[in-house]
Amino acid sequence: MKTIGMLGGMSWESTAVYYRLMNRAVVERRGGLHSAKMLMHSFDFGEIAVLQTADKWDEIGDRLIIAATGLAQAGADFLMICCNTQHLVAGEIERAVPLPLLHIADPLGEAIAAKGIRRAGLIGTRYTMEKGGVIADRLTEKFGIEIVVPEADDRAEVHRIIFDELSRGQFLESSRAALGAVMARLVAHGAEGIILGCTELPMIVQPEDAGVPTFDTTTLHALAAVNMALG
């Protein structure tokens, strides 16, 4: 079994979901007392969030590169960034660290394409929705999937729910309803499926909330990591 190098803590709530998903998947595959072999660098998300707000992506990249280098030196066989937004600096990490990086958009694109979907709605942080380099550009270029994002007011509300509630462990029914309304408007604009493009979103959004297939980036990424570790 290969050792997974996790860049986590962004937020710790969703990183805990990754940890559980990967260990359960290894138990299902290997049985007995087996569990996933992993190394983790868990960031203080408060520090990263400040840099995001200040648009200091070069500094975020530098911090992730230092952490990824430490994971490589500690014995990780490949890397994963346990956060959609931080994939804005995935290219910098790939260039600086001599380990494979399991990009969050790749298992996502494969899952969407397997459903025959060519136009998908995307919800996530405002960085993920507004900066195509997180996952949207990769989905379009590599898989031919057109991405639709919410209007400005909806983007602001989704971002607020993620940072003010979900990342703090708060899951309100009113916010679930608000997210459902955002997804409904994306479907009305032609989305055939909805990407839950923030690792916190699957903790509140249920598959039936969208009315179309939903794609949970957290689960898809975690299970792809297990496949890579056991492959």
Image: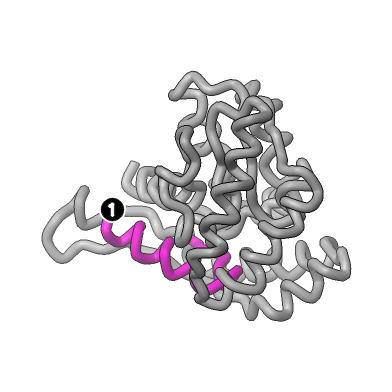
Q: Residue at x 54, y 64 (%)?
A: 174
Q: Is residue 95 magenta?
A: no
Quadrant in which residue 27 is drawn: bottom left
Q: Residue at x 74, y 52 (%)?
A: 155
SS at circle 1: helix
Position of 2 with respect to 6 (left or right) is: left
Residue furthest left as drawn: 32
Query: In terms of depth relative to the viewer, which is nearer, 161 or 103?
Result: 161
Query: In terms of depth relative to the viewer, which is nearer, 176 or 53?
Result: 176
Q: Is residue 14 magenta?
A: yes
Residue 124 location in percent, x, y? Answer: 65, 52
Q: Magenta region's main secondary structure?
A: helix
Quadrant in which residue 140 is drawn: top right
Q: Residue at x 56, y 75 (%)?
A: 42
Residue 227 location in percent, x, y? Answer: 36, 44
For label 1, the residue is: 25
Position of 175 with respect to 146 (left or right) is: left
Q: Magenta residues, as a range?
A: 5-25
Query: In terms of depth relative to the viewer, which is nearer, 133 or 215?
Result: 215
